[in-house]
């Protein structure tokens, strides 16, 4: 069977692809730009855009991994009903959907739709910490606001492994899984963990919210995106910091820790 993966060039989607290949599945990855997409050998790469459902190659696909947001500004996808109609018509039976932090129109469409659906609600990805790599390499510093806030960071490899298990094995229809790592950590604790992994001191400097916002705007992030992200971090909902056992329940092994993520990615910070 062929499994379609949206977001296959992204942090979590790349892991979905990796895990599906490890399970011996045929993978069709969609991207808006096949020329820049670097996907593993054996993956069928098709140019398509979730905002234009007619471009999504559902033919011959039995299960699909979809996103709730699209575009470089992570705007919410409003094409859900059309996407699901086309998927059903093509014979797709199973869908996994990665949420974008709230119950989005895409999540409404998937959970109201006719296909066997599973919604994955990951908290902050551990890979978000890669945004600190440059300032750690150059100055040995991490600048972030909200030192008090703890987040139950999830390893993106665990998101991929859960999505692949659900898509291939089934048995999770109609379920919504929050996905977290094994512990909730503050930014200073994350910084100390990376510091231990690279064997070098890293200084944490607490930014004001305004400084963090300015930095995001200078980096080209839309104001709305910056405000949503800062709002999430400032007043994190319980889903963001509450550790849950769903990774272990689905996979039969514990969720991976931030310490192991930091060791795997140590070279990015050296
Ligand atoms: N990062 C977090 O902490 C976090 C937490 C919870 C949920 N999420 C959600 O998880 C999802 C995946 O996050 P990520 O960090 O893995 O993403 P990412 O690395 O930023 O990559 C975004 C992916 O979305 C694809 N994409 C964007 N617009 C598209 C469109 N119009 N049509 C088809 N594909 C499109 C991109 O593909 P191409 O560029 O190749 O077209 C890329 O593969 C996002 O929707 C995000 O909102 C993230």
Image (cartoon, grey):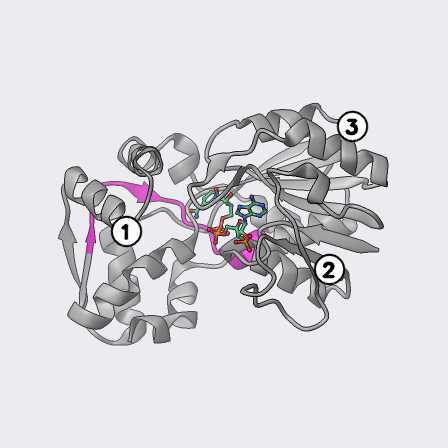
Instruction: Name the residue that disc number 2 marks.
Output: 27
At x 32%, y 44%, the residue is: 221
Q: Over which residues does the magenta segment extend?
A: 143-159
Image quadrant of residue 260?
A: bottom left
Q: Is residue 255 visible?
A: no
User: Dot 2: what SS?
Assistant: strand
Q: How far separated are the C-alphas under marks 3 and 2?
A: 23 Å
Instruction: Name the residue that disc number 3 marks.
Output: 114
Q: Earlier in the sequence, mark 3 or mark 2?
A: 2
Magenta segment: does it hold 248? no
User: Dot 1: what SS?
Assistant: loop
Instruction: Name the residue that disc number 1 marks.
Output: 219
User: Crowdedness of circle 1 by 10 Å Cα count: few (<14), some, many (20+)?
Assistant: few
Left or right for 87, reference 268: right
User: Crowdedness of circle 2 by 10 Å Cα count: few (<14), some, many (20+)?
Assistant: many
Q: Earlier in the sequence, mark 2 or mark 1?
A: 2
At x 84%, y 35%, the residue is: 89
At x 70%, y 67%, the residue is: 22
Q: Earlier in the sequence, mark 1 or mark 3?
A: 3
Give x and y (percent) for residue 230.
28, 37
Instruction: Please count the marks in the image.
Output: 3
């Amino acid at each position: 069977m062929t499994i379609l993966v949206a977001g296959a060039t992204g942090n979590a989607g790349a892991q979905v692809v990796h895990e599906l290949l490890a399970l011996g599945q045929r993978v069709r990855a969609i991207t808006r730009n096949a020329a820049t997409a670097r996907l593993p050998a054996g993956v069928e790469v098709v140019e398509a855009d979730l905002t234009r459902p007619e471009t999504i190659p559902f033919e011959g696909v039995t299960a699909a991994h979809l996103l709730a947001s699209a575009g470089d500004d992570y705007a919410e996808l409003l094409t859900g009903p059309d996407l699901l109609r086309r998927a059903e018509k093509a014979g797709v039976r199973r869908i996994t959907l990665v949420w974008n932090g709230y119950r989005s129109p895409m999540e409404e469409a998937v959970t109201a739709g006719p296909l066997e659906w599973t919604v994955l609600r990951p908290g902050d990805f551990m890979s978000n910490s890669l945004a600190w790599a440059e300032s750690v390499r150059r100055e040995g510093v991490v600048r972030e606001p909200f030192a008090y806030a703890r987040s139950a960071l999830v390893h993106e490899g665990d998101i991929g492994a859960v999505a692949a298990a659900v898509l291939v094995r089934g048995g999770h229809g109609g379920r919504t899984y929050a996905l977290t790592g094994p512990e909730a950590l503050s930014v200073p604790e994350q910084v100390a963990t990376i510091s231990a992994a690279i064997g070098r001191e890293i200084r944490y400097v607490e930014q004001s919210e305004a400084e963090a916002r300015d930095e995001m705007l200078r980096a080209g992030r839309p104001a709305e995106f910056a405000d949503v992200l800062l709002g999430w971090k400032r007043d994190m909902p319980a889903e963001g910091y509450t550790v849950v056992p769903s990774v272990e329940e689905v996979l039969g092994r514990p969720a991976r820790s931030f310490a192991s993520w930091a060791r795997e990615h140590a070279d990015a910070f050296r």
